[in-house]
Image (cartoon, helix red, strand yellow):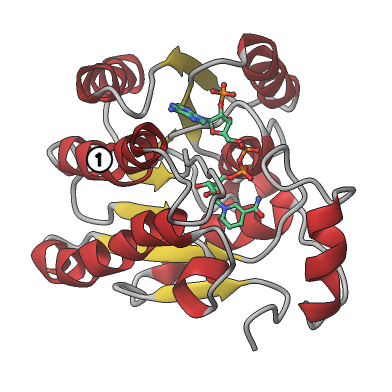
Amino acid sequence: MNDTTSTQSLPLLGKTAFVTGGSRSIGAAITKQLAADGAQVAFTYRGSPDAAKQTIADIESAGGRALAIVADAADPEAVRAAITKTVETFGGLDILVNNAGIASASPIDQITFEDYQSMLAVNVTGVFVATQEAVRHMKEGGRIVHIGSSATKYAGVPGLSVYGLTKGAITGFNRSLAYDLGSRGITVNTVHPGPVDTDMNPVDSEWAKLLIPGIAVGRYGKPNEIASVVAFLASPQASYVTGADILVDGGFTS
Ligand code: NDP
């Protein structure tokens, strides 16, 4: 970033981003991509401090600035405090990415109420709390990107009914939110990944063998293939994209 020409071309230079669940997998790829595009990035994590340190090291060694904050997405006070710390550290907030999510697969007659409550707390309440707190700080040009799921919005998957309930809620939330925030120049969009090789959904599993034949491009996605779309939606170039559901699924639901 010392080179003047490359600095001028960075689309997120001077912006501050906050990513939930940025220590590993898709969230780490998003965090690194936003930093590579010039943003200073804060991210939350819950249980993987070594992965969080690695994400910070990767960003700093590339010349970026990042902050890792322990904050359970299911804990509203922790999420609000993390956003406050981000604003105090970096001087504002321009971009929110609601990435943290958990999935527990079970048929409806076997899923426990505790699993239901956990998914609701992280995947829905966590999104609401982070969004409400973030928009209190955002100005004209703010960007919000939620991570949904192509499987649960566009195609049923056995055992994922409750996960689908939580991810489907994001789409409903986002439609009206686009109107609430449009007059303030803030966009809100949902990226729906298809199967992506992460700790949550590893490509070397039996489950993956069943899914791959149904993916048009014939393979799982990589975290950076989600991150690049999120980074575009976070950029000034995406100023007329809002209230949208963006599929990034290799044709899984085509
Ligand atoms: P992983 O489980 O591989 O990684 C999850 C990340 O979120 C980790 O950084 C983890 O951090 C963090 N996290 C989990 N729970 C919490 C919590 N309660 N509070 C704070 N941070 C938390 O998931 P993926 O990267 O695969 O998934 C990311 C998002 O993409 C999720 O919303 C998921 O539903 C969605 N998605 C994933 C797909 C896939 O195929 N992988 C497909 C469609 C959607 P730590 O370990 O430090 O707690």
Q: Which residue is mark 1?
A: 125
The residue at the point 22 percent across, 24 percent down is 80
Residues 201 and 63: in front is 201
Q: What's the residue type where badge 1 is placed?
A: Thr
Secondary structure found at label 1: helix
Residues 107 and 254: in front is 107
The residue at the point 27 percent across, 23 percent down is 87
Horizontal side, residue 31 vs residue 210: left or right: left
Judged from the image, the quadrant occupied by ligand 1 is: top right
Q: Position of residue 67 (x, y in %)?
A: 49, 17
The residue at the point 90 percent across, 48 percent down is 204
Tell me the quadrant of the picture where the C terminus can be found: bottom right
Within 10 Å of the Cα at label 1, are there few (<14), some (14-19), or many (20+) other Cα atoms?
some
Residues 230 and 123: in front is 123
Q: Residue furthest bottom?
A: 254
Q: Position of residue 138 (x, y in %)?
A: 20, 43
Q: Position of residue 83 (x, y in %)?
A: 28, 25
Horizontal side, residue 236 vs residue 197: left or right: left
The residue at the point 31 percent across, 19 percent down is 82
Image quarter of residue 231: bottom right
Residues 77 and 185: in front is 77
Q: Position of residue 66 (x, y in %)?
A: 54, 22
Tell me the quadrant of the picture where the N terminus can be found: top right
